[in-house]
Amino acid sequence: MARYLDLYGLFLVQRFKILMEYRVNFLIGASSTIILQVSSLLTIWVVMSQIPSLNGWSYYEVLLIYGLITLAKSINHMFADNLWTIGRQYIRTGSFDRFLVRPINPLFHLLADRFCHDGIGNFLVGSVLVITATRQLNIPWSLNNVLYLVLMVLSGGLIFIALNLITGTTAFWIMDAVPIMRVVFDFHLFAQYPLSIYPRAVGILLTWLIPYGLASFYPASYLTDRSLGWVAWGAPFVAIILLILAYQVWKFGLKYYAGTGS
Amino acid sequence: MIQAIRRRTNIYGAMAGIVPKTFLAYSLWVWVSLFLNTITMTILVFFWKAVYADTGTIAGLDLQTTLTYILLAQIFLPLGDLSMIFEFGYSLREGGIAHALLRPVDFQGGFYVQYMTQTLTSLFLQIPMALVAWLVFGLRFPTDLQLWAVFILSAILGRTILFFFDWMLACLTFYTTEVWGLGVLVYGASLFFSGSLVPLAMLPGWLQTFALATPFAQALYVPLSLLTGITPLSQAPMVLLIQVILLITLGVLSRLFFRVAVRKVTVQGG
């Protein structure tokens, strides 16, 4: 474990050296996602400033939900974005071979190969939203709440990574897995708003099958004193189960890898 | 003279013909896009229904008008698509721009033909979306032919305005060599200011004035507001006149901008 952490540090240093070669590009990339988020936030602001609540959720409560899902997404964006490119960049070109001949886990190598700086913008936006919303909603920054938030955000991030790993692994068979990945990934858009505004089936889907709701709606419900029982604590358990499942799928897919180029 | 026109039409026709083929080459993406757009549509419909649960109108718009606008905005989304930044960026990276500049065809004209064909193809591929909106979400299409005629005219003008603006932004890649970040940045701005997420009539006065002045709004919101009746038909002549003025101004500026920026072209590969 310690060896892998050291190695990740080395990969990260190298990545930042590359990024710093083009500083303007780095800044545009890191801030681009902020603009993207600002567009959605402006929409929420414009609408919420004209109505008292959205299905019983106030403006800042909606922002809390939005902030939590953005933070969880940013973890996936920064540390596991390379899953999106496995087919196009590594399998199609045959460069995935190099991961297989080195004495480290190929999945770790794939993820560590590229820290995605675009995710920094998402992380900043999510942090600002969660901090602002919790302050405005008078949610105390007690040790319990802070630990709960950190646990939920990390678990949410792992749920994103696990789902992307499962769908991304299909690249071993179909080469370009991006369309499949997008189909599942885009369901997280539902979880930007209170799940209670959708039909019951969507709520069940976002809780049990593609559980992005566990990263945003349920933690926000818990923090705003809406009693939901144990589901509010479900994210870490689901994240672990999904990660184990995703890794098994990855190992299964790896057996079918065949380089296509050189 | 006639021969020259025929020759030019043949060239631009061939360039336009390539576009639908590139779409058909990625049929999986076409179906996935349909699915993703349906997700977006579903979210927007339930979001707006929840918004209107406690209120009758917002900025003078009732739920039915807002839903009609939002669903039509999703169907006509290709009117607000931007592609020039990535076109220029990748052709710089792969060296294709060197060949394109050498061709005995007007560089901008060629891209414009492809831009408009791409829009038409994308709109054609949105027909299943329109069916979903109609059958699943109960979209009522406007039936007044006059509205459709004004809409089509405004959409062509708006799309051309956006092309010239997109063109100028794409010229920035000659200086920055950055593509992805710049593309996402502009896409983010277009998402809001085009009115694809919220009718611009709901914006506070100062923001609405600014948004309406952007080419993003001219391409999507302005034509759609005419079609849905948010902007009365009596105001159509003024709206179209503003679009013509913007089109001429940005058209001239885009030519000048390119003439200066092209001196900075540095091909990275190919």
Image (cartoon, rainbow, N blue to C red):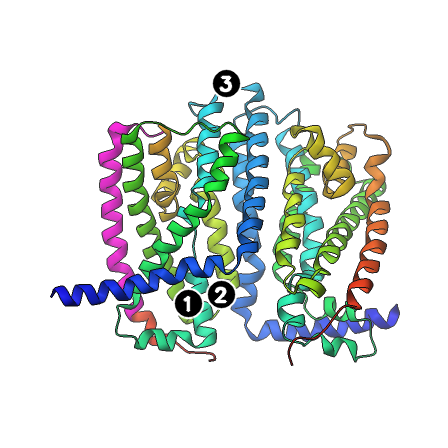
- In terms of image quadrants, where is residue B144? top left
Residue B88's disc number: 1
Q: Is residue B194 above or below residue B117?
A: above
Q: Which residue is mark 2?
A: B179
The disc numbered 3 marks a residue on which chain?
B
Pointers 2 and 1 in contact (CB under 8 A)? yes
Q: CA distance from mark 3 to mark 1?
A: 47 Å
Label 1: few (<14), some or many (≥20) within 10 Å?
many
Q: Amino acid under label 3?
A: Gly
The residue located at (49%, 31%) in the rendering is B134
Q: Which residue is mark 3?
A: B56
The residue located at (52%, 30%) in the rendering is B135
Q: Amino acid under label 1?
A: Phe
Select label 3 or label 1 by which is in front.
1
Q: Is residue A224 left or right of residue B184?
A: right
Whole-percent x and y of residue B247? 26, 50
Which SS does the magenta portion mostly show? helix
Q: Amino acid under label 2?
A: Val
Q: Earlier in the sequence, mark 3 or mark 2?
A: 3
Q: Nearer the viewer, residue B35 or A164?
A: B35
Q: Quadrant of the C terminus of chain A?
A: bottom right
Q: Which residues are magenta?
A: B230-259
Q: CA distance from mark 3 to mark 2?
A: 44 Å
Q: Nearer the viewer, residue B6 or A5?
A: B6
Q: Earlier in the sequence, mark 2 or mark 1?
A: 1
Q: Is residue A237 above or below residue A175?
A: above
Label 2: few (<14), some or many (≥20) within 10 Å?
many
